[in-house]
Amino acid sequence: MPQVNGTGNTFNLPNYAGDLFTASQTQTPFLSMIGGLSGGKQTDNFEFQTGVVYDLPDAEQPNISENASTKAPEATHVAREQRTNVVQIHQETIDLTYAKQSNSGRLSGLNTASQSANPNDEKAFQIQQKLVKIARDVEYSFLNGTYNKTEDGSTANKTRGMLELCTSDAGTSIDAAGTALTKSLFDQLFREMADNGAAFGNMVLFCNSYIKQAITNLYADFFKAQMQMTQNIAGMNITQIESDFCKVGICFDPFIKTDSLLVADVAQAAPVFQPVPGKGNFFEEPLAKEGASDRIQIYGQIGLAHGPAFLHGAITGLEVK
């Protein structure tokens, strides 16, 4: 159903009796696993560090003779490079007329004796839904966000998401080029992650509904697995993969791109908040009044501390039917 823009009043936000339901996805598993909207790190700079990375030279067998050892070799040193990300602004407004808030007993639609409006507090309902919207937007950004660091006040900071991190030059990703998910693709991904230095801490695979079912069918078919079955229970649900390098939990996430899957070390990821002095972060405050309505804004600044790119991996461009 359409969103109501502008001021909410008695007629564009009618009251109804009955239980409240939404078909919109409200689960934000990646955000929840790394701290949610209330846990994580803080910064007082919109740009923050996500780690300092360095490389050691390739391993090799020394070739130093006794005579050569009498003279020390040329000095060499390990260089380091800092990696960063940025917080982005989330801002929402509600504006409800006094008349709307006063008319909680005016019901539209089908009504039966002794029924009342649900919700009975329009302001509280709208504020709660704005927080849900922000959580959904954060989840989407943390998975699919495209990085941008502003140089002036007219362009927006945008936090880098996990898929962009994995597909960067420093990351580990495989382009499936429109092919179906296979165990060979998984083997290649885990192998390349291991070769690139992944620590394989707390690994979780995030995928959409189609890929989630494809994973279950893939491993059931590949290993000729027999599903549990009794007289009234049958089915299979692959919730963990054991690779040669780690165990990987499988998590359905409705906000990841439909043709991609992400393997993330969630132990190395966290939300980063930039609180406003004296107000905190993701706070609610009244806006200046222009008349007989309550105008309220919800404001917060958040970014993703994702750690080094080599800790994670992704497969993109998968076939989706």
Image: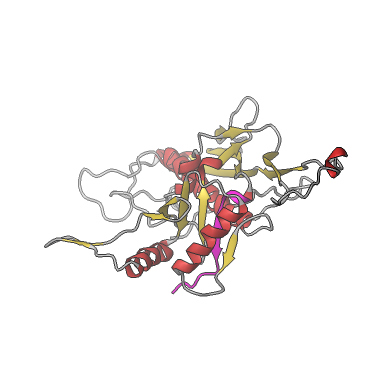
- Relative depth, front residue between 221 and 267: 221
> Image quarter for residue 125?
top left
Q: Is residue 23 left or right of residue 54?
A: left
Q: Is residue 49 left or right of residue 212?
A: right
**Magenta residues, as a range?**
310-321
User: Is 84 rendered above or below residue 284?
Assistant: below
User: Is 315 rendered above or below residue 6?
Assistant: below
The spot of residue 202 in percent (x, y) is: 47, 44
> Image quarter for residue 80?
top right
User: Is 265 rendered above or below residue 275?
Assistant: below
The spot of residue 252 in percent (x, y) is: 41, 56
Say which quadrant the N terminus sits in.
bottom left
Reply yes or no: does residue 241 show up in magenta: no
The residue shown at (41%, 38%) is 102
- Relative depth, front residue between 143 and 287: 143
Furthest residue in direction top, as rendered: 278
- Evaluate whether residue 6 shows in this view: no
The residue shown at (69%, 58%) is 169
